[in-house]
Image (tube, rainbow, N blue to C red):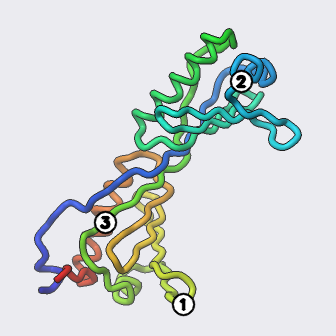
């Protein structure tokens, strides 16, 4: 069966990690936060930020005295927003002054996908201009997609890693787009 004869199906996509910055409109007293929240890690001689780990959801926030935070570990935008609200509510409840509405900016979404078929990476490298495939150095094909702007690591197993997206919809769009391009160029070999 040629890949052009493969029935259309939705590739499996899963968000693995969202990295975001949270900007508050004022500086924070990290020493005060450390005294109010003993579960945080703060060692300014080693690292300028305070490390705050949530167990539910499993999120880590790096909090800086400038009022900026870097939040990692969320598996969805909703989970990210929930975690930021939870962190800020905890700080407020412990007497740490928080003013204004925080700005949340997604910096990077890392996702995985499974196309459910074997990919002919040699053929894909020819079909995808600008892609890099050097199996002696790395077992996957690296493709920098322009719309949306993401980087795809495509493996012969049909599994992929997607990085660089700013919105969840971009991940799905990128995976569906690459699936169609691979299919059109006969790069997809169905499992027997």
Q: Is residue 177 left or right of residue 100?
A: left
160 or 27, nearer to the observer = 160
Image location (x, y in percent) of residue 124: 36, 83
**Quadrant housing residue 90:** top right
Q: How many neighbours does mark 3 have within 10 angstroms: few (below 14), some (14-19), or many (20 or more)?
A: some
* SS state under label 2: loop
Residue at 26%, 82% (x, y): give it: 185
Sooner in the amino-acid sequence: mark 3 or mark 2 = 2
Depicted 14 relative to depicted 52: above or below: below
Image location (x, y in percent) of residue 1: 12, 86
Sooner in the amino-acid sequence: mark 3 or mark 1 = 3
* CA distance for labels 3 and 1: 23 Å
* Residue at the spot of label 2: 38
Q: How many neighbours does mark 1 have within 10 angstroms: few (below 14), some (14-19), or many (20 or more)?
A: few
Task: Specify whether residue 60 is in view.
Answer: yes
Image location (x, y in percent) of residue 87: 57, 24
Query: Which label belongs to residue 136?
Result: 1
Q: Is residue 44 left or right of residue 97?
A: right
* Residue at the spot of label 3: 114
* SS state under label 3: strand
Which marked residue is nearer to the observer: mark 2 or mark 1? Answer: 2
Which marked residue is nearer to the observer: mark 3 or mark 2? Answer: 2
192 or 169, nearer to the observer = 192
């Amino acid at each position: 069966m040629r890949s052009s004869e493969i029935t259309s199906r939705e590739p499996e996509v899963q968000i693995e990690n969202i990295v975001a910055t949270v900007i508050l409109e004022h500086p924070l007293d990290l020493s005060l936060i450390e005294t109010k929240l003993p579960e945080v890690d703060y060692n300014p001689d080693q690292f300028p930020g305070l490390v705050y780990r949530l167990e539910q959801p499993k999120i880590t926030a790096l909090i800086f005295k400038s009022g900026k935070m870097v939040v990692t570990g969320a598996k969805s935008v909703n989970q990210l927003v929930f975690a930021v609200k939870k962190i800020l509510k905890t700080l407020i409840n412990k007497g740490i002054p928080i003013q204004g509405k925080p700005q949340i900016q997604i910096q990077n979404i890392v996702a995985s996908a499974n196309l459910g078929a074997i990919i002919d990476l040699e053929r894909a490298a020819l079909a995808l201009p600008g892609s890099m495939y050097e199996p002696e150095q790395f077992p996957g094909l690296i493709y920098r997609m322009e719309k949306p702007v993401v980087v795809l690591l495509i493996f012969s197993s049909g599994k992929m890693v997607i990085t660089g997206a700013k919105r969840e919809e971009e991940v799905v769009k990128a995976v569906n787009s690459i699936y169609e391009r691979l299919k059109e160029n006969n790069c997809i070999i169905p499992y027997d």
